[in-house]
Amino acid sequence: MAAAATSHLVSSPACRRHRRTLTNHRLSQNPVARIPVAPLKGAAAGPLKRLQLRAAVSQNTAVDQQATAFKHCFSKSRDGFLYCEDVKVEDVMESVERRPFYLYSKRQITRNVEAYREALEGLEGAVIGYAIKANNNLKILEHLRGLGCGAVLVSGNELRLALRAGFDPTRCIFNGNGKLLEDLVLAAQAGVFVNVDSEFDLENIVAAARIAGKKVNVLLRINPDVDPQVHPYVATGNKNSKFGIRNEKLQWFLDAVKSHPNELKLVGAHCHLGSTITKVDIFRDAAALMVNYIDLIREQGFEVNYLNIGGGLGIDYYHTGAVLPMPRDLIDTVRELVLSRNLKLIIEPGRSLIANTCCLVNRVTGVKTNGTKNFIVIDGSMAELIRPSLYDAYQVNKHNNIICSLSYKIDL
Ligand SMILES: Cc1ncc(COP(=O)(O)O)c(C=O)c1O
């Protein structure tokens, strides 16, 4: 459900200027610098070539984050009630057919996309690929498609949903380390980009291309081994991650792609570091490594034009006025690298496009006590929002005569 509303925004306190100097320690996390390329197995032909990393992690990564106040679409008004933009949430509660319900601000979604779009100005051909796992509500997908977003998919059903929402397949990327053959066939037929995640994934993509009778545009998802400095559960681009190809096996994959010219066209490289990232210089570290992989790939005759740096921008979970990087901070930190190689940038934001646009609206059913503790009982439960009860995930609650949780509909 998307609420129509006009602007009524609360801003966090003005952001501090934030500077951070990168130390050298991350250099040691990149195994390409010291591990020889694994010998080829299986994939045909091509001279065995030792890949050497010519990029160090970024030397000068001090990032001047924009002093842009973070915007919220939910606010407590002077009358004491919660508003979404200028719509009183209680009025919406009275008018809906069923409760509890999720209330979204369409305007906030638009503002979030615009922040990325403006940040990407000057980067021709850039794609904002919305990571559908963040929220797969069809109305929201249609709205994001209408705003020009592409879609990032991790299952056949997400792919079907994206096609139903009308996303341009050439702006969609099929990700994941367990893609099924039948879903890859659909991806090949639809003409979406597919990320290669492993040796068996590559085999399945080749098989899917043959079944569909279509060449698949692929990106190599390379594990850059950069530590995103986030909770281990959402760190996906370090050496122990289950995602992506080991960067020291890049040559093996290049030879494998070369040996399937009728099935595969290599168009770019991808990485995704993790989620809830609040230090954007980490993206620069990854991009510095990635553009050097792209140099190596191009040297071997591949015409790769896309650099996909994934998603992961942190959000204001706690509403404490924390200094948070904005889309412009993220894009500015990789801009020069992207331009220096004449690349088209793909980004894959999920939660940073949707999390601050939504609340779960519950009505208080009654209040009870066990003698020592009082309980406010509401009409919502873990069926609507499982994360807090499942693993103690943090939620912001706003009270008037309603309880409201700024929430993420689907767990990442
Ligand atoms: C490959 C990939 N891209 C994008 C995302 C979206 O990340 P976020 O919601 O942190 O922006 C994820 C999240 O898991 C992901 O795995």
Image (spheres, rainbow, N blue to C red):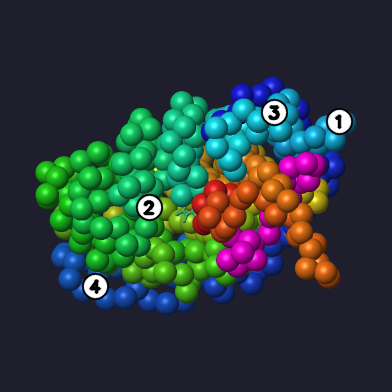
Residue that carries the numbered disc 4 in the rendered image: 40
Which numbered disc, 3 or 4, marks the residue that appears first in the sequence? 4
Helix, strand or loop for disc 1: loop
Amino acid at the residue labelled 4: Leu
Task: Locate residue 408 relative to residue 40 in the image: left or right.
Answer: right
Q: Nearer the viewer, mark 1 or mark 2?
A: 1
| Residue 394 is one of the magenta-drawn residues | yes
How many angstroms separate mark 2 from mark 4 (CA)?
29 Å
In this orientation, which residue lies closer to the viewer: 259 or 395? 395
Helix, strand or loop for disc 4: loop
Circles 2, 4 touching at the beta carbon (< 8 Å)? no
Badge 4 crowding class, 10 Å Cα cut-off, few under 14, some 14 to 19, many 20 or more, is some
Q: Is mark 2 within 8 Å of ligand 1?
A: yes
Which numbered disc, 1 or 4, marks the residue that appears first in the sequence? 4
| Residue 156 is one of the magenta-drawn residues | no
Q: Nearer the viewer, mark 1 or mark 3?
A: 3
Q: Which residues are magenta?
A: 387-403
Q: Position of residue 69 (x, y in %)?
A: 77, 38
- Tell me, for residue 91, which label it has, or none: 3
Which numbered disc, 1 or 2, marks the residue that appears first in the sequence? 1
In this orientation, which residue lies closer to the viewer: 294 or 210? 210
In this orientation, which residue lies closer to the viewer: 57 or 375? 375
